[in-house]
Amino acid sequence: MTETLLSQEGWVRVGGFVLALAAVGLAEGLLPRRRRDFRRLQRWPSNLGLVALDALVARVIVPILPIGLAAVARDQGWGLFNRWRWAEALEIALAVVALDFVIYLQHVMFHAVPILWRLHRMHHADLDFDVTTGIRFHPVEMLISTGVKLAAVAAFGPTPLAVLIFEVFLNGTSLFNHANLRLPMGVDRVLRWLVVTPDMHRVHHSVLSAETHSNFGFNLPWWDRLFGTYRAQPRLGHDGMTIGLPIFRRPEELRLDRLLFQPFRSESAPTSLEPPHEEGSGI
């Protein structure tokens, strides 16, 4: 079973992504948390276009993917997990947690280092918050992130199956925690001890700087609590908060060409924190 999964890892990751995107997109359509400021047709083509472009760039430029490197590390005995014998289930669990911690640290660095923030801010400049925000990343940021994951895989030496599980988990939770999805308060309160929920991560997409630089977790919520970057709720509430950044707020900034050039543009663009409200039931 394991060998079959690994031999079809590309289809497993793509299939998991498509199923998660469809399921979360349907759920947020049925139980929306906030009214949309822009129609899906204004945002989704560019956000989905970035996914295709990111995948193409990675395939062309990156010589080996994390799962492939994990197989090499296993054969060569590289990394922490290859120094001792571990029960498979324990190794997978520890590897997923370790890789998630690396992604948390990476996310903090993308906020803290100015040149990295210029790349990452495109993700935050989305003028609405929904499932496609979770796949809206600049291709250069994705290349850097892939490099970080490759370094982590070489250092830890997790099994290829652990890396595959982590990749599917990362993609699925990124879609889930960016969803415009209304969860019952009691469910959210319990769930956010186990996984980053949409209400928890939405705070991270607030226009207020103190909230933007909080709640960095993508998958596991523990790192924010442990390192003091956790913020339970936005100051103005989820219905009153403004999504995005003080810059890049005009509707034309939602176009794919504008998104790709955002990292190279001035941060002193005109800012209006009141985007035009459009009928939320439209597409």
Image (cartoon, rainbow, N blue to C red):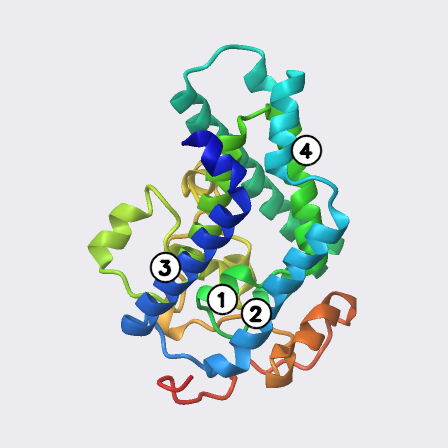
Residue 273 image-quadrant placement: bottom right
How far is mark 2 from mark 4, CA to CA? 28 Å
What type is the residue that disc 2 sits on? Asn
Quarter of the image with the N terminus in it: top left
- As helix, strand or loop, the secondary structure at mark 4 comes to helix
Say which label, 2 or 1, has the lower sequence index.
Answer: 2
Say which label, 4 or 3, has the lower sequence index.
Answer: 4
Task: Please tell me the numbered disc located at residue 151.
Answer: 4
Residue 72 image-quadrant placement: top right
Residue that label 1 marks: 132
What type is the residue that disc 1 sits on? Thr
Task: Please tell me the numbered disc located at residue 199.
Answer: 3
Say which label, 2 or 3, has the lower sequence index.
Answer: 2
Task: Name the residue: 50% across, 60% down.
Answer: 134
Residue that label 2 marks: 47
Tell me whether the residue at label 2 lies in contact with that at label 4, contact meaning CB atoms closer than 8 angstroms.
no
Task: Name the residue: 41% across, 38% down.
Answer: 222
118 w.r.t. 168: above or below: below
- Name the spot of residue 232 as percent of width and height, x first: 37, 53
Tell me whether the residue at label 2 lies in contact with that at label 1, contact meaning CB atoms closer than 8 angstroms.
yes
Q: Residues within 10 Å of mark 2 (few under 14, many from 20)?
A: many
* Of the two numbered discs 4 and 3 in the rendering, the one whose residue sits closer to the viewer: 4
Instruction: Tell me how many marks there are.
Output: 4
